[in-house]
Image: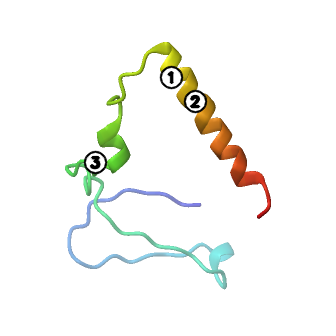
Amino acid sequence: MIHTILIPSDTDIHLSIPKEYVGKQIEILLYTTDEGKEEKAPITKTRKLRGTLKLSDEQYKDFQKHAKNIRSEWKRSI
């Protein structure tokens, strides 16, 4: 694998392919290193709900037990 970072001086780049890569499928990616850094990750529905349930310890245990029970149904054949 070859990984390099460069700053082009114009719009053309010449690539020399190593002999062992000839005849093989290769992947070439082109992007700026600061691309996407300014964007914040989208807030998912579950992320918005994080921490909204204010459960007592007993309620939390009951909730986890219920979740475990309904997940076990996924394993059974229908």
In front of the other: 19 or 61: 61
Q: Is residue 75 left or right of residue 5?
A: right
Residue 52 drawn at (x, y percent): 32, 30
Mark carried by residue 21: none
The quadrant in which the C terminus is found is bottom right
In front of the other: 61 or 11: 61
Q: Which residue is mark 2?
A: 64
Residue 61 drawn at (x, y percent): 57, 21
The amino acid sitting under disc 2 is Gln
State how far apart marks 3 and 2 are (Cα): 25 Å
Q: Secondary structure at mark 2?
A: helix
Q: Secondary structure at mark 1?
A: helix
Q: Tell me whether the residue at label 2 lies in contact with that at label 1, contact meaning CB atoms closer than 8 angstroms.
A: yes
Instruction: Note whether 26 is above or below 68 in the view shown.
Output: below
Q: Which residue is mark 1?
A: 60
State how far apart marks 2 and 1 are (Cα): 6 Å
The amino acid sitting under disc 1 is Tyr
Instruction: Note whether 41 is above or below 23 in the view shown.
Output: above
